[in-house]
Amino acid sequence: MKQSFLVSLCRKGLLGGWITADDEAITYQTGKLTVPPEFRNLKLPYSEICGVAKGRLLCLPTVSVTMRDGACHKFLVFDRKRFCSLLASKGICALSE
């Protein structure tokens, strides 16, 4: 079953969008045309995620997702607890702040 999360990608500012989670991956999407094409539909397969860390941007909750290729994507997640629970159910543990 797919789940959706309201998020902002932290890359040269906050880029509003959402993450859709399915059985194979989480996918960040945005409708903003000013966002580079590689980030408009960013698919992050669970099998390629090697680490997740919780943090804060000012006082807002963030989650950083590190991929096996070394790329790191930081998201401001508005329901971080539910998002981290989803990742944990896929075998990906989130590090504490």
Image (cartoon, helix red, strand yellow):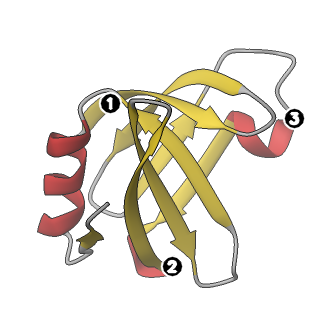
Quarter of the rendering containing residue 82: top left
- Identify which residue, 1 or 63, lies in the foreground: 63
Badge number at residue 36? 3
* Horizontal side of residue 90 vs 18, given as left or right: left
Question: Dividing the picture into quarters, in which one does residue 4 lie?
Answer: top left
Q: Amino acid at mark 2?
A: Glu
Mark 1 or mark 2, which is nearer the start of the sequence? 1
Q: Secondary structure at mark 2?
A: helix
Three-letter code, disc 3? Pro
Residue receiving disc 2: 48
Name the residue: 16% across, 67% down: 88
Position in image of residue 52 (x %, y %)? 40, 68
Q: Quadrant of residue 54?
A: bottom left
Q: Position of residue 35 (x, y in %)?
A: 82, 27
Residue 61's disc number? none
Residue drawn where x is 64% and y is 65% of the image: 72
Q: Is residue 87 left or right of residue 76?
A: left
Q: Residues within 10 Å of mark 2 (few under 14, many from 20)?
A: few
Q: Which residue is mark 1?
A: 5
Find the distance from the CA under tag 3 to the CA under tag 1. 21 Å
Q: Which residue sits at x=29%, y=71%? A: 95
